Amino acid sequence: MSESSRLSTLIQALCCLPGIGKKSAQRITYHLLQRDRAGAKYLSTALDEAMDNIGSCRRCRNFSEADLCDLCLSHKRDKSLLCIVESPADVYAMEEAGFNGRYFVLMGHLSPLDGIGPRELGLDKLEEYLADGDLSELILATNSTMEGEATAHFINDIVQKYQIRVTRIAHGVPLGGELEYIDSNTLSHALAGRREIIK
């Protein structure tokens, strides 16, 4: 049985979501049409409003409806700490972990094959941020992938001329993890990032 063109269009549209293939998109479409048309209308309206009204913060590049986001406007945050992350989702994770400094969101990582270079990551804006002189420490919290590591090294090279302390978040053995089940790359990172026990 062939699907109508509108049905096919909706299924194809849902396939743009991460982790959603054709079968999952089909299930979602049929569910919305069969059981939750009100929810589908609400979703449609929310998507429209988000696409029209959510942009990027001028300073940190995080998602924001205003020129400056709430995190950048807050006077309660430590202005001397700047955390570099790859995505707005990483900002949320750092907030959940209790970080109280400022952020700079790269919206990706260096990937020359995909056409993503320093300009696409907004590193020119980062240099403006660094030149302000308010920072005492820059925390590199990019992912521990090859691209994330390359991006961290590239940013570290940029920061050196500003005489700002640069740190990298630790990668290694997860809390509650057993060594026999940890892969060798993770253990290698954990060994390289070991710290002295304070007595």
Image (cartoon, rainbow, N blue to C red):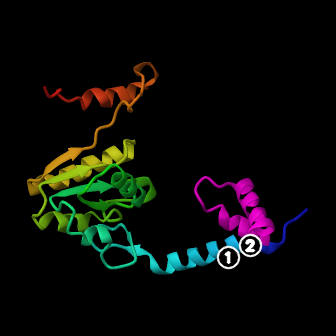
Question: Where is 127 relative to 141, above or below?
Answer: below
> Which stretch appears magenta?
7-36
The three-letter code of the residue at mark 1 reads Lys
Question: Where is 135 relative to 171, above or below?
Answer: below
Q: Are marks 1 and 2 in contact (CB under 8 Å)?
A: yes
Q: Is residue 58 magenta?
A: no
Q: Quadrant of the N terminus?
A: bottom right
Local SS, label 1: helix
The residue that appears at 46% across and 22% down in the rendered structure is: 181
Local SS, label 2: helix
**Magenta span: chief secondary structure:** helix
Would you call the spot at circle 2 few (<14 residues within 10 Å), some (14-19), or many (20 or more)?
few
135 left or right of 152? left
| Foreground residue among 182 and 16 | 182
The residue that appears at 61% across and 52% down in the rendered structure is: 19
Quickly name the residue at label 1: 41
Would you call the spot at circle 1 few (<14 residues within 10 Å), some (14-19), or many (20 or more)?
few
| Foreground residue among 1 and 167 | 167
The three-letter code of the residue at mark 2 reads Arg
User: Which picture quadrant has residue 144?
Assistant: top left
Q: Position of residue 90 (x, y in %)?
A: 38, 54
Q: Position of residue 81 (x, y in %)?
A: 19, 56
Quickly name the residue at label 2: 37
